[in-house]
Image (tube, rainbow, N blue to C red):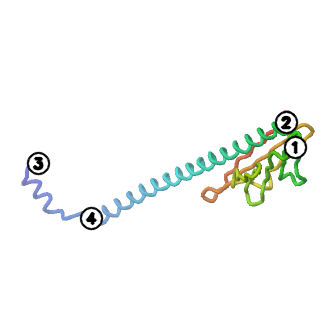
Amino acid sequence: MSNITAHRWLRGRRGFSLPEVLTSLIIIGILISVVYSVFILNWQAFEDYSTRAGMWQDMDQIIDQVTIDAREAATVTVSADQKNVSMFDKKGNLLVSYSFLSNKECHVIRGSENLTLTHNLDYTLSLFEKKSKSLSLNVVLRDDVFGRGVSIDASTEIFPRN
């Protein structure tokens, strides 16, 4: 196309027509909404995964510490409501005490040390249970991610060595 032909063709056109502008805006709007929804879904999945990973770390810490302490204890006593467990040595001295609290925390008291192991405890479903030769531990952790409940649960049975 020569310069003269292109110039004549462009001279008659001054811009885009209204239907062309509206069509392009609609297409851009659809693309933006699709990209945004994919972004939000991926963000929710990431937050869900991150929350679960953090809760599994808390769960592992609780189970590992209770298991180690129970295996060192000579005597294990569980409260009537099954929310507290105390572990004693052979002389009857308190080694450690674990408590499930209604404010969604799991506390451990070892000497003068008072630690919180998690802030996501489901108080109603978590408990200690003393069986004839073992200690059963049921722990449920819950949290909210984007208004949806995320929960994990684990149970273990510990046989003290003593």
- Label located before the other in sequence (4 or 1): 4
State the SS at label 3: loop
Q: CA distance from mark 4 to mark 1?
A: 83 Å
Q: Residue drawn 30% across and 61% down?
A: 20
Q: Amino acid at mark 2?
A: Pro
Q: Closer to the camera, 94 or 82?
A: 94
Which disc number belongs to residue 76? Answer: 1
Q: Residue 1 shows which numbered tag?
A: 3
Image location of residue 76, percent across then percent down? 87, 43
Write down the quadrant of residue 24 in the picture. bottom left
Relative to 87, does residue 32 appear above or below in the rendering? below
Pick whichever of labels 3 and 4 is earlier in the sequence: 3
Residue annotated with mark 4: 17
Give the image location of residue 113, x and y in percent: 73, 51
* Disc 2/disc 3 C-alpha distance (Å): 92 Å
- Mark earlier in primary sequence (2, 1): 1
Q: Residue at x 73, y 40 (%)?
A: 64
Mark 2, secondary structure of its residue: loop
Q: Which mark is residue 160?
A: 2
Q: Which element is circle 4 on?
A: loop
Dot 2 or dot 3: first in sequence order is: 3
Kind of residue at badge 4: Ser
